[in-house]
Amino acid sequence: MSSTAGPADQATRRTFLARAVTAIQGLMGAIVAAVVGGATLAPSFAGARRSWQRAAAVSDVDADVPTPITLRLIRQDGYRQVVDRRVVYVQKEGANGVRVLDSTCTHLGCRTRYDEALKRFLCPCHGGVYDLDGSVLDGPPPAPLRRLDARIDGGDVVVRV
Amino acid sequence: MWTALLDWLDARTGYRTLRSHALDEPLPPGTGWAFTTGSVVALLIGCQVLTGIGLAMYYVPSPSLAYDSLRYLMSEVPLGALMRGLHFWGASFVVVAAVIHLLRVFLSGAYKAPRELTWITGLVLLLVILGFSLSGYLLPWDQKAYWATTVTISVAESTPVVGGLLANVLRGGSELGSLTLGRWFAAHVFLLPLALLVFVVAHVALMRKHGISGPIAPVSGAPIPFYPFHVIKDTLMMAAVFAALFTAALMFPAHLDEIANPADANYVPRPEWYFLSLFQLLKYFPGPLEVVATQVVPGLVVGGLFALPFLDRGHSRHPWAPSRRVFTVAMGVLGMSVVLLTTLGLRDAPVRFDPNTWGPQSVAGFLTAEGEGNACVRCHVDGGPASPVRTTRIGRDEGWITFHLSDPTAIAPGARPVDPNLDPMLDGDATRAVLAYLRRMRAGATPPVVAPETAMVVRTIGTRCMACHRLDGDGGDTGPDLSHIGARRDAAAIHRIVNDPNDEYGDSVMPIYGTRLTAAEIAAIADYLAARK
């Protein structure tokens, strides 16, 4: 700007100021982006919270027939609490074990049902068929029914959901 | 490769011409720091837009969820409180920056021909910014928001002839409620941003069309290229303001009151500080004269500002030039009046609510809901049919909770007829105490620690006495406030009154507690209250 500066000085000065402008404005932009971006994206990376829930009394569960149990799960959904209902199949396994299968079909997420005559889990949507232990016997499902962590605690079956 | 790509892009779009048009404006020599005020406003508006978008990802414009969504953002979301803090403080900063910009333009006489419309679009932008402040103030749906908006709408209601209609349009009906919140939210995030965009574009386009006014007295020399020689000044000034904004948001987080309680007639409403001068002015024009403060004075000020370029037609731009002196004096008087009224308004500011101040009523509610032998844990336990009371953060209104507390199995009030013979689980006094406790918890308080020896007396005072008396901000208004009763009465006098108020006052509406409480209970109450100096 100074009238005594030569053209070369003027050019250097111009380059320096232009870089300073870019750097300072970039820094302010980055700070705002970090705050807004952080606050926006943070919940995306929060894992689901799991806890042990009582599913049924051991005395209500059979060894050879899966018992459908509706779990009532109170879950924090952002700023409100919601109650999810989730159906699981509970079955005794061995002397002290218990097997709990998620009733959701691994193909596209339909709810399977247990057919007592066939002793199979059937999916009504695309004809998936699962064995008593959850393994796929027929149809499109890519994986066995999901098995949930479960144990017997006193007289109760508890599952981790 | 990179240059070739940019060349191609330029050949197709001509962006280099646009960029050089935007940046290579020659400025009048002598253009200095005073001309950075507009850029600061632009920076702050940009910041408000970005943080506003972030807030909108969480905010729900509904009375039952607005407050909880903000509480969640502030306490659970990383950086959420900071983001709201930037938006909250940004609102104040942008008003101040816009007023400073206006004063700079005024003092340098930059509104004179041919820049009248630049001035007018700028004034419209200032009104739009104030509209943002006003509409944004309601959105948190806390006590402050609810009651300040009640006042704002009453001000609109005082407009002659059309006031009633105007107020109903602002409220979306005759009561302030969900419809009000919906339309103020839509105004805040759709309507006003659109207006802002249109007028910012017009303001900047007009500024470019006529060039900036430059120093009052022309300086000789070569023009200054806008980029980067003036942009660096803009940028440094913006950086200083941004640093101040960020520090404010970090050091003084935005406040959230208790959730709006339309039944609480004791709340002292108060607008945001930049409307405080108008609010204070209202105090000097009571009754039928109110319209002077709500309409006449603001109307004259705004009208005068709009008319300024047409009233001040002289060529001199110096603020003390003979033709301009009258306007400079008028602006000085206006500025000093605003400062004076704001100072007076700030002086009687109410005490800020802190959810962690636990008075006897909320503590009694805590003991009722969570203390030994309470009935709530039958359902409100981990893994039970309902969440523990402490974490339930119930989003129901108080009418619902009141019903639920008298008949806990009724989780849908109105679904079955009320049994007149039903023995309510909690009586009205205990219910009020639990409501006070739940309000504190909803506002993010930590549960109180109650010494076992004071539990009984606090519980008795919180339920019995505070049904009618006020103590530490909670309680009823039938009897006198007991917050400092110890300064007026000693323990013996309090004991006598609680035992039988008729002994002291003759015919009193206060119940006789000598027959309802034990002597030990009355003595404990008297000692507790006498200690409240």
Image (cartoon, coloured by chain):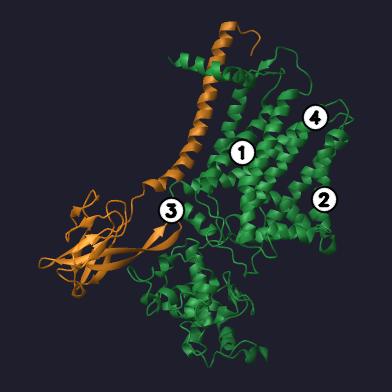
Marks 4 and 1: which is nearer the front? 1
Q: Would you say A73 lies left or right of B1 here? A: left
- Which residue position holds label 1? B45
Marks 4 and 3: which is nearer the front? 3
| Kind of residue at disc 4 | Gly
Q: Are marks 1 and 3 in contact (CB under 8 Å)?
A: no
Which subunit holds the residue at mark 1?
Answer: B
Distance Cα–Cα, label 2 vs label 3: 45 Å
Q: Is mark 3 on a helix, strand or loop?
A: helix
The chain in orange: A
Earlier sequence position, callout 4 versus callout 3: 3
Earlier sequence position, callout 4 versus callout 1: 1
The image position of residue A88, as x and y in percent, is 26, 63
The chain in green: B
The quadrant of the rendering that contains the C terminus of chain B is bottom right
Earlier sequence position, callout 1 versus callout 2: 1
Distance Cα–Cα, label 4 vs label 3: 50 Å
Q: What element carries label 1?
A: helix
Discs 2 and 3 carry the same chain letter: yes
Give the residue displayed 61% in from the left and 38% down from the top: B45
- Which residue position holds label 4? B109
Q: What element carries label 2?
A: helix
